[in-house]
Image (tube, rainbow, N blue to C red):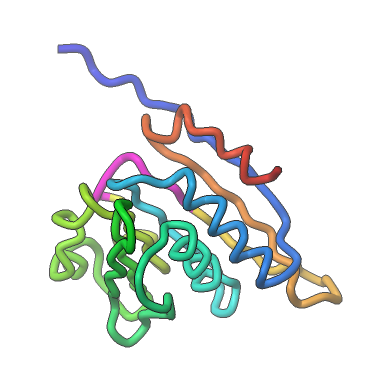
Amino acid sequence: MEAAVPHSPVETELTVTSPEQMRELGRKLAKLLRAGDLVMLSGELGAGKTTLTRGLGEGLGVRGAVTSPTFVIARVHPSLGDGPPLVHVDAYRLGGGLDEMEDLDLDVSLPESVIVVEWGEGKVEELTEDRLQVQIHRAVGDTVDEVRHVTLTGLGERWATTGLSVLTA
């Protein structure tokens, strides 16, 4: 049996200058997502992870207000149409790796859902080789607090042919 050829990561970078632009980025990104996708969000507190996820929820057409699930750890937002549900996870308070995440049954939800995990580094990578990592950085030294630099990195076969560059248009 032949070994799978690893795919090079696909990366795109953009600058976001307002919370509304961050939501719009989420709405655009939602058009690229499908059931089985894992999106990992990283960035300091207040960077815009939940704002981006709110846009994803709007773009996916899911039920319920997308808010930070910090205290409940995970929220499921069912689709209002025929799209996949959105599972929004905040792993900030979870110290362990995938072992602690197993209680959330993300591996069971993944095939039929879009799973977005805030603070998931070192905790959810084992769920799938195909994932989209989104890093949000505040512009250092910028006089405008709203400026963010966003780097999207698609890993695995799923993202090898997905045109992330459409997000910069």
Q: Residue at x 28, y 66 (%)?
A: 78
The quarter of the picture where the C terminus appears is top right
- In the displayed structure image, the side of residue 108 where residue 121 appears, left or right: right
Residue at 42 percent across and 26 percent down: it is 7
The spot of residue 16 in percent (x, y) is 71, 61
Q: In the picture shown, does residue 155 fall above or below 93?
A: above
Q: Position of residue 52 (x, y in %)?
A: 54, 65
Quadrant of the image occupied by residue 117: bottom left
The residue located at (29%, 60%) in the rendering is 85
Q: Is residue 129 left or right of residue 99?
A: right
Q: How many marks?
A: 0
Counting from the top left corner in percent of width and height, residue 9 is at 49, 34
Q: Find the residue positioned furthest to the bottom.
A: 71
Q: Residue at x 74, y 74 (%)?
A: 146
Hey, which quadrant is residue 11 in on the image?
Answer: top right
Q: Horizontal and vertical percent for residue 66? A: 42, 75
The magenta-colored residue range is 126-133
Q: Is residue 36 left or right of residue 120?
A: left
Q: Quadrant of the N terminus?
A: top left
**Vertical position of residue 1 compared to residue 91: above or below:** above
Who is closer to the viewer here, 105 or 25?
25
Q: Is residue 92 magenta?
A: no
Relative to 72, residue 153 above or below? above
Residue that extends furthest to the right in the rendered view of this protein: 143
Say left or right for 112 vs 24.
left
Q: Toward the viewer: 48 or 33? A: 33
